[in-house]
Amino acid sequence: MNSLWKWITDLKKECSDCNGKGKVHCHCNENNEIICPNCNGKGTVEKSVVINQKMEVPCDNPHCHEGKVQCAVCHGTGVKADGEVCATCKGKGVVDCPVCFGLDKIQRNHQETWQEHITCHLCQGKRYVPCPLCEGTKEKVCPTCEGEGEVWDKGKILLLAVGAGLVLLLPVLGISVALLTLGYTGFCFWKQKEK
């Protein structure tokens, strides 16, 4: 009985990855260094550089000629239909372009983007950093058992869960069988009474 109780209560087993020691061999190099996780051993990292600047470019209105467009009122004649001088263009037949305001140039935002390689701030360009896992001992905490040397025995836990389920289910099954038996007996008694 004691051995069964010990089996039930002992739900952990020795970790097979570290053989119960809680530590495993660290894969850092002979200088106790690992590849820099920030630059992946390149020594440099890429940084996007974006420059926004305003540029003057020629007016892109296709009707603009040297900052002027044809007057829409007199259609470039300088006079109205009644022969009077056009008040809009003052008889010139052209007005300032509504896009460039008569300057023949417009400002556009120009953006330049490129990748710049800068020295990695973590390894200072050396490509390696001191190993944070073993601190020079060449052993690190076992990731499977997290240093405990034991892991949960999933097989035992599954067996106990199935066993507990059966223990809970048996009374329900027992009640169901009893009700079926009583129901059948009552049915038989009623049939006999009818005869």
Image: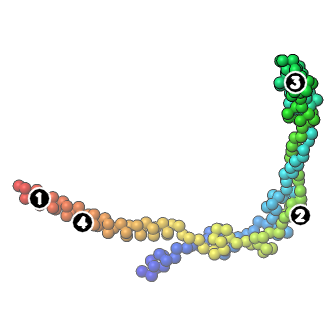
Residue 110 locus on image (x, y percent):
87, 43
Q: Front-most of 54 and 89?
A: 89
Q: Is residue 18 left or right of residue 108?
A: left
Q: CA distance from mark 3 to mark 4?
A: 110 Å
Q: Residues within 10 Å of mark 1 (few under 14, many from 20)?
A: few
The first of marks 3 and 4 along the sequence is: 3
Instruction: Locate residue 48, reporting x and y percent.
Output: 84, 51
Residue corresponding to mark 1 = 190
Look at the numbered disc 3 and give the secondary structure of its residue: loop
Label 2 and label 1: CA atoms lie apart by 94 Å
User: Nearer the viewer's eye, disc 2 or disc 4?
Assistant: 2
Given the image, on which type of amino acid does mark 4 rest?
Answer: Ala
Disc nearer the start of the sequence (2/1): 2
> On the image, numbered disc 4 is attached to which residue?
178
Viewer-closest of 3 and 164: 164
Give the residue drawn at x 79%, y 66%: 28
Q: Are marks 2 and 1 in contact (CB under 8 Å)?
A: no
Name which of mark 4 and mark 1 comes first in the sequence. Answer: 4
Secondary structure of the residue carrying numbered label 4: helix
Q: Which residue is mark 3?
A: 86
Cβ–Cβ below 8 Å for labels 2 and 4? no
**Disc 1 marks which amino acid?**
Trp
Quarter of the image that includes the N terminus: bottom left
User: Counting residues from the N terminus, which is met first, the one under dot 2 or under dot 3?
Assistant: 3
Which of the two discs, 3 and 4, sits closer to the camera? 3
For marks 3 and 1, the one nearer the N-term is 3
User: Where is the C terminus found, in terms of image quarters?
Assistant: bottom left
- Which residue is identified by label 2? 124
Rate crowding at label 2 as few (under 14), some (14 to 19) or many (20 or more) other CA atoms within 10 Å.
Answer: some
Q: Which amino acid, by three-letter code, is at mark 2?
A: Gln
The reply to whether dot 4 and dot 1 touch (C-beta < 8 Å) is no
Query: Toward which corner of the image does residue 25 lie, by quadrant?
Result: bottom right
